[in-house]
Amino acid sequence: MERAILVGAPPKGARARQQLAEHLGELAELADTAGAIVVGEVTQFLDRPNPGTYLGKGKIEELRAAIEERGATLVIFDDELSPAQARMIEQLIGRRVMDRAELILDIFATRARTSEAKMQVELAQLEYMLPRLTRMWTHLEKFRGGIGMRGPGETQLETDRRLISHRIRVLRERLADVQRARVVQRQGRRGIFRAALVGYTNAGKSSILRAVAAAREVLVEDRLFATLDPLTREVELGDGQHVLLTDTVGFIRKLPHHLVASFRATLEEVLDADLLLHVIDASHPAWEEHRRVVDQVLEELGVEDRPVLHVFNKIDRLDHAQLFALQEQVRETLPSSVFVSAVTEGGLEPLRRALLGSVRNLRRVAELRLPLADGKLLAELHRTGEVLSQRAEDGVWVVTARLDPAALGRLQRRGAVLSSAN
């Protein structure tokens, strides 16, 4: 098992020391998830990173001494290193170096289960590897196997740039096919209210899906990135209402850009959702920063204007005073919030009530009259709305359906006559 030393070197600032502790704590969790034992930390507050070695000369010497003292086999930097910086540091300390982005990619490689997830991770790893190919060749003989070497495997380190570029093109084409298939699947689900669980990794999204949908097959683990593949389940809300609820991959600080790009097909489930359920670990001291990280990724995906319900989970870990203080804190800044627990009896009822209210507010029940001969218009109504009843009367179809305003407007423009709505 790898013995790792963590390196944190944030810019100097008012909150730099507090953020450094939080970030290195999370980096230690990532290292543990990847299978490493953390044996030490080296830190430095920088005016600006050294262009050659990221750290200053004296700190590199301190790092080398720590490696020898603690028998470390791996050094993990909390920030992304350039290929030149990583190569230079490895030459100076005589150990393999990886950064936070490479560590996250490696964890995704071990977590990928479906063929789609494996393709997405491989694409991200290859795009990360391509500009670092020279470095990979230079240390291939010294460092073999271990964390950061999984996923596509060692055989890819023996290929040349042309073969890797070709593989990237093939993977992009295959993922484009997956994306087109997902579009067809989503079209087949039109007419049903859809909500997507988004949030920081290990906030409890899968636990919520498992509990609210009574789906025991949903994997729940108290580890980072337990879920990579989107999973959709139908949830009954009562009063004849239901919602399709989708769990998505969790986000994290400094999520590698290549990873976000390659998982775009998966994250497009978020694009088609009527409502985003932003799950927040209420018991985590850095929940506000976690919320901002998720908001940034959602903005990158182009869904920052989608309706959002903030779901503060794990309130069973707070005492009454802490919960009251949290509720007071978010009352003004995040008024659209509910406070839940996925592990206590009745702990998800506030979420159920909020979902039921969202379904009723967004989709009104309307009675429409359509020409009997217009089969295409009737088919569109079935595709875009939730049909509650349908009968033929006086040469027309009389259809009662639950529709969102946009779908209702399209149907009226194409000839449907609105009889009543409530």
Image (cartoon, grey):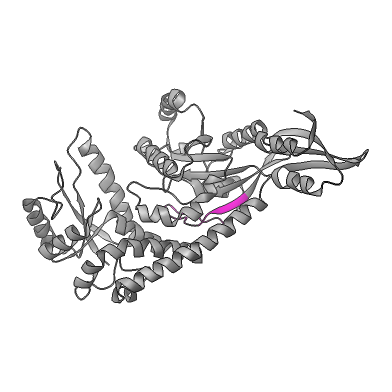
Q: Main secondary structure of the magenta part?
A: loop
Q: Is residue 379 left or right of residue 247?
A: right
Quarter of the view holding residue 299: top left
Q: Where is 85 relative to 328, above or below?
A: below
Residue 274, position as x, y percentages in the image = 59, 40
Q: Where is 307 relative to 140, above or below?
A: above
Q: Could you tell me which residue is drawn at 31 percent across and 76 percent down? A: 159
Q: Could you tell me which residue is drawn at 22 percent across and 72 percent down? A: 137
In the image shown, does 334 or 303 lie closer to the viewer? 303
Q: Where is 82 relative to 239, above or below?
A: below
Image quadrant containing the C terminus: top right
Q: Residue furthest right?
A: 394
| Membership of 314 in magenta stretch | no
Q: How many marks?
A: 0
Residue 190, position as x, y percentages in the image = 66, 47
Residue 253, position as x, y percentages in the image = 34, 46
Q: Residue furthest front?
A: 414
- Span colored in magenta: 217-233
Quarter of the view holding residue 296: top left
Residue 223 appears in the rendering: no
Residue 60, position as x, y percentages in the image = 10, 55
Q: Is residue 73 left or right of residue 398?
A: left
| Membership of 226 in magenta stretch | yes
Image quadrant containing the N terminus: bottom left
Quarter of the view holding residue 63: bottom left
Q: Where is 173 relative to 245, above or below?
A: below
In the image shown, does 17 or 106 lie closer to the viewer? 106
Q: Is residue 184 left or right of residue 110?
A: right
Q: Could you tell me which residue is drawn at 29 percent across and 51 percent down? A: 27
Residue 204 appears in the rendering: yes
Q: Could you tell me which residue is drawn at 84 percent across and 42 percent down? A: 390
